[in-house]
Image (cartoon, grey):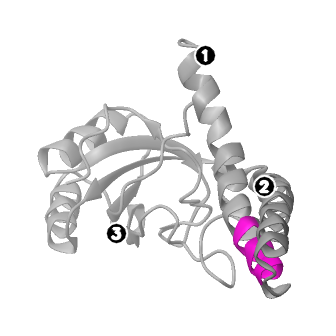
Amino acid sequence: MSLIVAARFQTFDQATVAVQKLFTEGFTEDDVHTFYINTAGGHARYPLGGDRVADPDAKGGHLGAVAGASALGLLFALLGGFIATRMAAPILIVIAAAGVGAYLGALAGALWIVGRDKRKVRATPGDEEEHPAVRAAGVMLALHVPVGKEALARQVLRETGGRDIERAQGRWQNGKWQDFDPLTPPERVEAPTSNV
């Protein structure tokens, strides 16, 4: 495993300036890897896009949808049946009422279940569970750092406009960070900056 220091830049031109400065400090072309990181959720790891099979915050939403559709569908069908018998209307009113109830129930049930964990977190302060840090979109300049040059690398990246400087242990091969995973939370060595 190799020590890797990386920073985010707004443009490839800014990253190129940093690369030139790194070359003057003794780093080689094989030590530098520049690439673009998409926004969170835009890494297309699945055929229909996205980074995960399902949104972790949507856990249990399907159960809420089924329960809500069943409960409100039945309630609206009974209400439609009552109205239909009072007005001597066709059975179509019962079917339409059940459909509307099922639709509204599925929506309300899913939203109730999906939002439930967030309501619990707000109710118990100090017990908040946050999402792991994600990398902002931008040009990433990754640098393979020899022993003893980490401080110099971080200083050059910071001075040339690098943001969200991080360090990692990774596999560096053929001048590239081979095992880079945009979903792995970064190990920041400096406080993250705004997403500008």
Residue at image mark 3: 29
Q: Residue 151's image quarter?
A: top left
- Amino acid type assigned to the residue bearing label 1 in the image: Asp
* Residue 120 shown left or right of residue 192 in the figure: right
Quarter of the figure that contains the C terminus = bottom left
* Residue 142 shown left or right of residue 187 in the figure: left
Residue at image mark 1: 127
**Reading the chain from its start, which is encountered first: label 3 or label 2?**
3
Q: Residue at x 43, y 52 (%)?
A: 135
Q: Few, some or many C-alpha atoms within 10 Å of disc 1 (few <14, some 14-19, many ≥20)?
A: few
Q: Secondary structure at mark 3?
A: helix
Q: How many marks?
A: 3
Q: Residue 189's image quarter?
A: top left
Residue at image mark 2: 68
Q: Residue at x 74, y 73 (%)?
A: 97
- Amino acid type assigned to the residue bearing label 3 in the image: Glu
Q: Secondary structure at mark 2?
A: helix
What is the span of residues highlighted in magenta in the rendered image? Answer: 93-101
Q: Percent position (x, y) of residue 166?
A: 40, 42
Structural distance between the alpha carbons of marks 3 and 2: 60 Å
* Residue 87 shown left or right of residue 67 in the figure: left
Structural distance between the alpha carbons of marks 1 and 3: 47 Å
Q: Percent position (x, y) of residue 62?
A: 79, 59
**Reading the chain from its start, which is encountered first: label 1 or label 2?**
2
